[in-house]
């Protein structure tokens, strides 16, 4: 395909080619740097809520089950996980208060699933 000199997309295509050249190694292998700053890599998280429970599903690929640390105070779930290649740190505010002692978790093929029973609504105070 031949590009005209006054093609409005010419600069755009040159930039894409430049970025691809930067990613390609000498042998044609792709090298993409992951952010391993203090916040760690990004975790894709989905939260599902029903009347009875809150379920958190997170993609945490490349980590052994033993390297995952979960903490919950009833309102915030903290996920810390890592391997020699990756580190993840996520603080997730849950959509409603949960009973942290009811938590159950599974980890299979890079997918972490944590389920909590919802905490009862505030108790009525009688006078």
Image (spheres, rainbow, N blue to C red):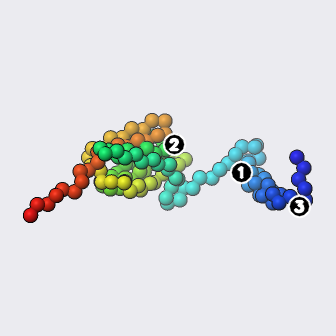
Q: Residue furthest top?
A: 108
For label 3, the crowd category at 10 Å Cα-Cα, with few meaning under 14, some 14 to 19 and many 20 or more, is few
Q: Is there any visible trace of residue 53 in the rendered image?
A: yes
The image shows residue 101 at horizontal and vertical percentages of 26, 46
Does residue 22 appear left or right of residue 75 in this picture? right
Q: Quadrant of the C terminus?
A: bottom left
Q: Nearer the viewer, residue 110 or 55?
A: 55
Label located before the other in sequence (1 or 2) = 1
Which residue is the site of mark 3? 6
> What is the C-alpha distance between the residues marked 1 and 2?
22 Å
Q: Is residue 62 above or below residue 14?
A: above
* Residue at the image position 76 percent from the left and 43 percent from the top: 27
Q: Which residue is mark 1?
A: 23
**Marks 2/3: CA–CA distance:** 45 Å
Q: Which residue is mark 2?
A: 61
Q: Residues within 10 Å of mark 1 (few under 14, many from 20)?
A: some
The mark lying in front, picked from 2 and 3, is: 3
Task: Classify mark 2: helix, strand or loop.
Answer: loop
In the drawing, does residue 84 fall left or right of residue 11?
left
The answer, for residue 18, to whether it is visible in the render is no
Disc 1 on helix, strand or loop?
A: helix
First along the sequence among labels 1 and 3: 3
Q: Nearer the viewer, residue 41 or 14?
A: 14
Q: Which of disc 3 and disc 2 is earlier in sequence?
A: 3
């Amino acid at each position: 395909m031949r590009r005209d000199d006054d093609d409005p997309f010419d600069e755009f295509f040159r930039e894409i080619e430049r970025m691809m050249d930067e990613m390609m190694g000498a042998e044609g292998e792709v090298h993409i740097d992951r952010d391993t700053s203090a916040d760690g890599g990004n975790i894709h998280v989905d939260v599902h809520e029903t009347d009875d429970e809150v379920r958190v599903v997170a993609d945490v690929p490349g980590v052994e089950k033993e390297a995952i640390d979960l903490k919950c105070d009833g309102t915030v779930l903290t996920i810390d996980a890592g391997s020699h290649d990756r580190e993840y740190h996520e603080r997730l505010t849950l959509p409603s208060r949960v009973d942290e002692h009811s938590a159950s978790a599974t980890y299979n093929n890079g997918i972490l699933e944590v389920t909590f029973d919802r905490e009862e609504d505030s108790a009525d105070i009688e006078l």
